[in-house]
Image (tube, helix red, strand yellow):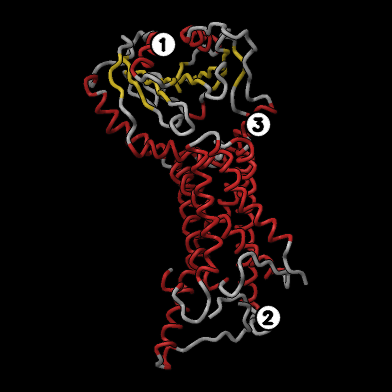
Amino acid sequence: MVTGAASRRVSPTNGSADAREAALKARTVRIWSVVHTWSSLISTLFLLLLCITGLPLVFHHEIDELLGYDPKPEIVQPGTAKRSIDEIARTALAHDPGRVLQYILWDKDEPGTIIAFTNSKVDGDPDATTLRAYDAHTAKPLGSVGGGPMLIFLKLHVDMFAGQPGKLFLGAMGFLFLIAILSGVVLYWPFTRRLSFGTLRDKSRRIAWFDWHNLLGAITIAWALVVGATGVINTLAEVMLNQWKANELADMVKPYAGKPPPVHLASLDVMLDKARKTAPGMNVSFVAFPGTPFTSSHHFAVFMRGDTPLTSRLLKPVLLDGETGEVSDARDLPVYLRALLVSQPLHFGDYGGMPLKIIWALLDVMTIVVIGSGLYLWIVKRRKHRSHAIAAQPLLQPSE
Amino acid sequence: MTAVRKSRSGGNWRAVYGGPLLLGVLSIAGLLSALFSEGAGRYFSWLALGAPVALTAWFFARRKRG
């Protein structure tokens, strides 16, 4: 594979069919090389950012807990009655005067905790939303949720503090990453077919990194494709949500068109009870208040979830009239939103316990090495071309 | 890809792509198993996704020196 500088270039003009085939192959390899090089180069910096910020985010739950951004409920006697959600909602509003409730969330892993989202307006800037935890049994405030260093990592990872454009830009970089992986798969053949799988040589620094690039790249292909693709899908979450609002949700709330938004909001406890009856066997995931991005301006939306790792991701919204609290409609989410919800754990790696998180982190580090070594190999190759020292040293080339 | 793969001048595509393909299928199976089943699926996912990492360590341990 490491051939001499005088690589056997077959001229297409010598007429033989074999030579033409060889020339065609060489051209195909060159085209894929260009695709691989440039899809990687353009996205390298951002992919390194995503991989590096993603590493601590794999453990954000543990880190938040350690740093005190994941408040825990008080220990209560088993069988203690839970407080009403209306009471918790009142407590939350009293705690943040002048703000309104956007969402109330039931922590799946911490049944004793209820999280209230408040903002200055129901459709206020998402970055201005405050999350506070309340004890489900005592209604006492437990402290704010999220925030701290992990929030900075999260913002860098999701949109680089640049809002929706930043998010879509990172989505495009993720798409280039997928192209880089697929073109890498094609190039794997001409570059490694003379080597056995897992060859690691240390003849020179360049050859050593070349072998690591190929080995780690090949070993992480499936994982990187899945994490990359689900990441790209996640960048389109807002687009999909707007699509749902413009079509399915608009259809569900058609009878309310033109009516003013509710003035006196219905009781949350009454609505939760009705939502549970409408979707039997499901648990409440969160309630969206009228006017928030997850519902219409007239309705509460109670999003119900199942209880297996898969069905807990598949939410079903129950829409309730904001004033009367009567059930208006309940429909499963469309396929694209369900695909988004199911794809999320495949990006986060948070669905298989601590061992899976550790493996996730190791695969992430391996991907960082693939990206870094790729950049290194490109720089070395370029430097060599510049210095015209091609004849002096062996090149890493596809074997013919 | 097939055009490159069908090279007549030596090289066996199974020897080249076999290992990565097997690990890829195993990885996907591991990614999905933990999603669909909380008990056995979880254990399987650790093995299936841990395998590529373990294999890398093994390749590193028996690498050629010099």
Q: Relative to the observer, which residue lies in front, A123 or A315?
A: A315
The chain containing the residue under callout 1 comes to A
- The amino acid on which the numbered mark 1 sits, given as a three-letter code, is Leu
Report whether A329 appears left or right of A223.
left
For disc 1, the marked residue is A268
Residue corresponding to mark 2: A393
Answer few, some or many: residues within 10 Å of disc 2's Cα (few below 14, many 20 plus, some between 14 and 19). Answer: few
Type of amino acid under label 2: Gln
Say whether residue A41 is left or right of residue A261. Answer: right
Numbered badge on residue A62: 3
**Viewer-nearest residue: A380 or A319:** A319
> Which badge, 3 or 1, is on the more N-terminal residue?
3
Q: Who's the residue at 29% across and 28% down the image?
A: A249
Q: Name the amino acid, label 3.
A: Glu
Q: Is residue A161 visible?
A: no
Q: In the figure, A24 relative to A316: above or below?
A: below
Label 3 secondary element: helix
Q: Position of residue A86 (x, y in %)?
A: 46, 8
Q: Mark 3 or mark 2, which has the lower sequence index?
A: 3
